């Protein structure tokens, strides 16, 4: 069959340059991308121009490959690659008459007839032997199991298939919906599930008594990976559709019942990425109305139509050639899309931005390294060149208190990471939690965890908001388990330190002084301290308010830091030293921390330092992963392991999420190149 298809393509009329490209494509590309270039194991190549790619961009991608993916660099000559590009362009849909981008082929029209006789009209997006995914009339995406259908009418005859046409509306997501958090258990609308950062679900269908029946429901293979890192995104879910981003700026809308995609997006990235090539990860979408928001490795912010995957607007955040990138999941609040920036290992200046979700116009910007004369500027040496390369990335999604209208955002390391001689002072606002007025972008207060950091102990964590009783008094608190090995509780109204105690066995410091600064015992240049990944990292913790416990994955490591002068060249990494890690002294644990006292209630030990996130539910369960690829469930009261599943690869950076669909609680976790969903299997009779 393939021979006939390829022969037909070769014999079809083609532009002169495309003819030799057809044979080259058949020999080198068809095995992954299909004989017609419309996708097989690899993506559809005929729609690249429709999504905004250029001949040169596609040439560069073929020649250099896609780092971290299964697509290698090409050994073909430049002339042969150009011939392949010409052939692919000849297969692309024609451009619109007005010069607009080309449109893809119209999907097949279908009418689904349910067993009750309802007719559901739409366009087919995907299908296998057991399910079909469609865009219903009006654009709503829905997946259906064929076992629940009486008939599928296809083509033009679908227009008059049945009299009873069931049309369900996919209501646009409002700010009120996001503000309500997890009140609707069929949704997960923001990175942490709600604005508090607790990653705590009210669902109780899966319990201590039945969790042993938890079983795989489906697995989605992304086909893209990040070497040395992980699949770090948290999916969003609404109306039976999962929206998820992946490594190398891929993104998908998936049928939540089957894991099959409605659409896939892949950004055509430049070949000269800086930090984006070093860490080609993405942590998820933001959602508002009918739009999805995603940051990119070349430091852009995109708005998608969530029904089609098409780009609505594209805004530049910063110049990626200097060292900037963007990897976080945007936080959407009332009338604003909040995004931060990556690239603190390059000579860059961190910032946090707010954008108009309708237009992509910037509303405000807060720089994490203050300009001369601004508050905090006296913690840096004089000179504009120091400010321009001060670091302080904002690359992890923060949290929001709508009553105070304050954003809580962590900031990263000063630059260079390990060499502090050229940046004497505390280096505000790096390694800090900053409370920012959401209306203006101005800082209301800050707390710096590691002044003048020389260990790359970013404070890019998810701040967890809760109302606690501390010292017998009720407090509106924000909690941070920090990379420096300390667990902190602050008053989220004014930043007052309420508690600071080690949650690791760090020898760097063991107490916080009366001035709020750590009492340093060992600077790490001679004796070991936590490594550059810290006592924990960006992987999200969870807070169960009924148990009154914070659950987090802790890392116990031993490293010595060797500072060296840095070159400070734009577009080049400048760590300013090296780190010597004693891997024989590394371990980890899932720990339960009492936020009122800082004491450990229990721990479950791992043989290596974990990088997985945590989720809790109202059933008293704790869901977590480890670096050995185990996805696990624990009793939140005792730490007893109740269930585990081997995913086959480290769970690195990702945290679980959960939702209800068709009356069943679903659990989702990302691991390696896959997204896995679990449900309770039927009870044995």
Image: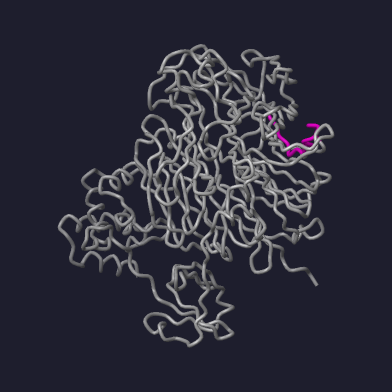
Find out whether residue 48 is within the magenta segment. no
* Whole-percent x, y for residue 285 in the image: 51, 50
Q: Nearer the viewer, residue 190 or 274?
A: 190
**Which residue is depicted at the point 54% across and 16% down?**
379
Comparing 529 with 159, the one in front is 159
Quick check: 409 above or below 508?
A: below
Q: Is residue 104 above or below residue 655?
A: below
Colour convention: one colour
Residue segment shown in magenta: 586-600
Work out which quarter of the rendered image holds the C terminus and state it.
Answer: bottom right
- Where residue 531 appears, as percent x and y from the top left, is 62, 25
Estimate the x, y position of residue 160 in percent, counting from the top left.
Answer: 41, 86
Question: Is residue 75 shown left or right of residue 70?
Answer: left
Task: Examine the rendered structure and indicate whether residue 619 appears above or below residue 281.
Answer: below
Quadrant of the frame with the N terminus: bottom left
Front one among 483 and 37 = 483
Image mark count: 0
Q: Is residue 390 above or below residue 587?
A: above
**Quadrant of the rendered image containing residue 598:** top right
Coordinates of residue 194 in the picture (x, y in percent): 63, 49
For residue 59, side relative to residue 435 (left or right): left
Which of the two residues, 637 or 173, is positioned nearer the viewer here? Answer: 173
Q: Which image quadrant is residue 176 in?
A: bottom right
């Amino acid at each position: 069959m393939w021979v006939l298809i390829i022969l037909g393509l070769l014999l079809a009329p083609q532009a002169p340059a495309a003819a030799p490209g057809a044979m080259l494509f058949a020999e080198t590309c068809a095995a992954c991308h299909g004989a017609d270039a419309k996708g097989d194991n690899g993506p559809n190549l005929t729609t690249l121009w429709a999504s905004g790619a250029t001949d040169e961009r596609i040439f560069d991608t073929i020649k250099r490959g896609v780092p971290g993916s299964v697509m290698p660099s090409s050994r073909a000559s430049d002339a042969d690659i150009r011939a392949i590009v010409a052939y692919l362009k000849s297969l692309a849909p024609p451009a619109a008459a007005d010069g607009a981008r080309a449109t893809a082929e119209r999907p097949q029209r279908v009418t689904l007839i349910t067993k009750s006789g309802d007719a559901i009209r739409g366009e087919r997006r995907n299908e296998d032997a057991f399910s079909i995914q469609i865009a219903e009339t009006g654009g709503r995406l829905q997946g259906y199991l064929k076992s629940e259908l009486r008939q599928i009418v296809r083509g033009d005859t679908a227009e008059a298939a049945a009299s009873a046409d069931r049309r369900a509306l996919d209501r646009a997501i409002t700010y009120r919906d996001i503000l309500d958090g997890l009140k609707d258990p069929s949704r997960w609308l923001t990175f942490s599930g709600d604005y508090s950062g607790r990653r705590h679900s009210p669902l109780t269908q899966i319990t201590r008594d039945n969790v042993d029946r938890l079983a795989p429901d489906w697995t989605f293979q992304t086909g893209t990976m990040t070497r040395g890192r992980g699949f770090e995104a948290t999916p969003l879910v609404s109306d039976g559709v999962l929206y998820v981003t992946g490594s190398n700026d891929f993104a998908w809308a998936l049928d939540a019942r089957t894991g099959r995609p409605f659409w896939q997006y892949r950004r055509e990235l430049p070949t000269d990425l800086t930090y984006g090539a070093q860490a080609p990860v993405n942590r998820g979408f933001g959602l508002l109305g009918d739009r999805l928001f995603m940051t990119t490795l070349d430091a852009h912010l995109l708005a998608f139509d969530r029904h089609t995957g098409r780009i609505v607007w594209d805004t530049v955040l910063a110049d990626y050639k200097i060292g900037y990138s963007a990897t976080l999941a945007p936080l959407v609040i009332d009338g604003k899309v909040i995004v931060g920036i990556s690239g603190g290992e390059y000579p860059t200046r961190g910032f946090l931005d707010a954008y108009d979700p309708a237009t992509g116009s910037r509303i405000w910007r807060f720089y994490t390294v203050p300009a001369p004369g601004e508050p905090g500027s006296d913690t840096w040496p004089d000179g504009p060149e120091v400010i321009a390369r001060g670091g302080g990335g904002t690359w992890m999604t923060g949290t929001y208190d709508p009553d105070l209208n304050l954003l809580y955002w962590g900031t990263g390391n000063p630059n260079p990471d390990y060499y502090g001689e050229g940046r004497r002072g505390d280096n505000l606002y790096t390694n800090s939690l900053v409370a920012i007025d959401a209306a203006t972008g101005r800082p209301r207060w800050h707390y710096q965890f590691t002044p003048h950091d020389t260990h790359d102990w970013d404070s890019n964590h998810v701040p967890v908001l809760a109302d606690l009783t501390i010292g017998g008094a009720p407090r509106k608190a924000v909690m941070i388990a920090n990379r420096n090995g300390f667990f902190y509780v602050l008053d989220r109204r004014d930043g007052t330190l309420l508690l600071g105690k080690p949650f690791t066995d760090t020898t760097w410091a063991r107490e916080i002084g009366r001035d709020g600064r750590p009492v340093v015992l060992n600077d790490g240049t001679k004796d070991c301290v936590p490594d550059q990944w810290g006592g924990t990292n960006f992987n999200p913790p969870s807070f169960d308010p009924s148990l009154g416990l914070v659950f987090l994955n802790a890392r116990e490591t031993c490293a010595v830091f060797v500072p060296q002068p840095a070159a400070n060249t734009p577009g080049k990494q400048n760590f300013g030293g090296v780190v010597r890690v004693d891997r024989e002294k590394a371990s980890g644990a899932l720990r339960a921390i009492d936020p009122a006292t800082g004491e450990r209630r229990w721990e479950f030990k791992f043989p290596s330092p974990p990088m997985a996130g945590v989720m809790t539910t109202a059933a008293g369960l704790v869901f977590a992963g480890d670096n050995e690829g185990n996805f696990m469930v624990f009793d939140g009261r005792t730490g007893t392991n109740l269930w585990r599943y081997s995913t086959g690869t480290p769970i690195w950076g990702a945290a679980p999420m959960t939702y209800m669909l068709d009356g069943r609680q679903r659990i989702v976790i990302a691991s390696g190149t896959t997204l896995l969903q679990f449900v309770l299997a039927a009870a044995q009779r």
